[in-house]
Every structure is written in C-alpha cells, then in structure tokens.
Image: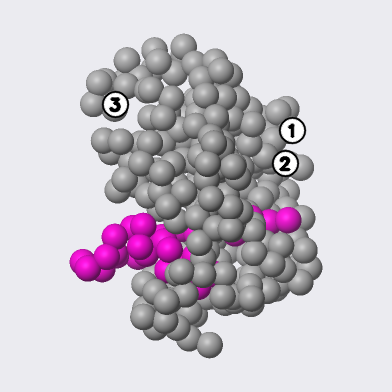
Amino acid sequence: MNFTRRDIGKLALAALPFTRVSGGAKIDSKFGGVQIGAITYSFNTLASPDPEAIIRAYGEIGLGEAELMSNHCEALAGAPGHDAGQEKMSDWRASTTPATWKAVTKKFNDAGVDVALLCYNMHDSMSDNDIEYGFAMANGLGVKAITTSTTLTMAKRIAPVADKHKMMVGYHGHDATDDPNQTATLESYDTLLSYGGYNGINLDIGHFTAAGYDAVDFIKKHHDKITNLHVKDRKKNHGPNVAVWGTGDTPIRDVLQLLKREKYPIPANLELEYKIPPDSNIIAEAKKCLAYVKSCLA
C-alpha cells in the first residue's frame, strides 16, 4: 500500500509515544516488538549552534533509541568547535575519560532515550590512536556496537581492534558498486565479515535497494551479523531518496514485518536524507516517517 504525504501526516498522530518523558521516563518506540530509533545524522540541521536540540527532537518525535554520531557526541561533551583549530581539538580529545562520555549518555537517558550505538566514521588517513579513540568513546557511552562508513581497507585494520575490545562494528553499506573498496556489493559484505568475528553490518536498506539487492533475503541470511538497519526509501538502479516513504522501491514494510515475525533484535533506525520540503521541517518530516514505519508494523 502506498501513502501520500497527507495520509502520513494523519498517521503521525498515531506515532506519539505511549510514555511521556518526565523525569527520565523511557520513551517507548518499540512497535510490534521492533525497536525504532534514529541516527542523529538526520538532525544535523539542529546540531549547530545547540547540540542539545538533537536530544529534545527525540522527545518531540517520540523516539526512544539513538544512534549517536561521534561529532554530535563530542559537541554534547563540550568539545571546542572545529573552527578553534586542530591542536585545541586534539588536546581536548586527549583529555577525555570514560566520565566524559558517560555524561553524554546521561543527557539522553534523562530525556528518556537510550544511546544504543555510536556512529564513528573511520577514514583511511586515521592513525591507530584515532581508531582506539572511537572504541574508548563507545565503551564510555556504554553502547552495544559501533557503526561506521569506511573502506574495506580500513575494515581490515579495524577488525583486530574490535576483537580486542569485544565490540561489534557494523559497517554501513552504500550503493557505490563500481568501487571495489566500498561496502556495496554482496562480495564486499562477505569480505569484511571474513576479517574478524566482531565485524558486522549496518544495513542501509535504501542504499541496498538502490544497489539492486534484496534486503529481505539478505537479512534472513545475515541477521546474526547485523547491528542495526538504516531505514530510508530509495529507487532502484541507484535512484534518488523519495520524500514520501512507501512510494519508492525499498521494501520497508516487508523488512519490518520480517523483523517482527522472526523477532530479530535488530534496531531499525530512521535516516532522513531527502530534501525537506519548504513548507515543512525536520521534526515534522521525522514524525511522518515514524508514522509510516509504525503503520508497517501494525
């Protein structure tokens, strides 16, 4: 069934949480046994100059689970802005302790939101110390896994560090199937999984569909290695994101019904990447997307 923007706007009222946030009461955004959350990347436009606005957004939308971007985490922990200079930022990072990150988790928890994952994107130019910094942040936050967009070259470097920390790393896939160093083809997923026991998959079902693959079949085969999903609606053949979920080619409903039916403990995180209409805003759009996702689990 396809939904118009008007339909989804009406459904948004049904997506409001059953538990209102008061004094840290947990926001319930688990529907049909499936945990629905969002990656804070969706709220980049809210993060500057007030990163606390991201936390407030979760409460307003009704989302009880966060995949926290590392730059947002650092901003919430009081890091100097990047315009302060690389040296000051490096000094600040060297001064952080587990308590630095625990304080960030507490801010979310006090708002009724669980910080389940840290998104720490690791680039080929990073040093071993940079990799360790991400794991220190994750351990301090108390998350269950790290997610990352990176190359297969880096995945091989990261694997022994993940093994050492016993921390799952979910590698985020894209649709760059023409780049053999990206996580995009089915073969590339097999390669990164072969590097270590704590290498896993952050499956973006929109990108996966755009790359020409069947997300439902893939989840059935690899559910025990999937840290979480990114939920968006894209067209096939490397097509665009669509603003009205349910009108693209991504099998959002079938994927969510699979999680519900099989009771896979895989969070499904909203990732809003489409252009926000001029008569709307990110909060309103996230509410519509949540309403659509909830309708898929009815």
Residue 106 in the image: state x and y as whole percent. 55, 29
Mark closer to the chain start, 2 or 3: 3
Residue of label 2: 198
Q: Residue at x 59, y 30 (%)?
A: 141
Q: Could you say which quadrant of the image residue 113 lies in?
A: top right
Q: SS at mark 3?
A: loop
> Against 250, is 15 above or below?
above
Residue 289 belongs to magenta span = yes
The alpha-carbon separation of the residues under discs 2 and 3 comes to 33 Å
Mark closer to the chain start, 1 or 2: 1
Residue 204 in the image: state x and y as whole percent. 54, 61
> Against 153, is 90 above or below?
above
Residue of label 1: 166
Give, as a three-letter code, the residue at label 2: Tyr
Give, as a three-letter code, the residue at label 3: Gly
Residue of label 3: 81
Mark 2 crowdedness (10 Å alpha carbons): few <14, some 14-19, many ≥20: many
Query: Is residue 209 something one can see in this rendering?
Result: no
Q: Nearer the viewer, residue 18 or 68?
A: 18
Residue 132 belongs to magenta span = no
The alpha-carbon separation of the residues under discs 1 and 3 comes to 32 Å
Residue 114 in the image: state x and y as whole percent. 59, 42
| Image-based side of 111 in relation to 29, left or right | left
Highlighted magenta segment, given as a residue range: 265-293
Q: SS at mark 2?
A: loop
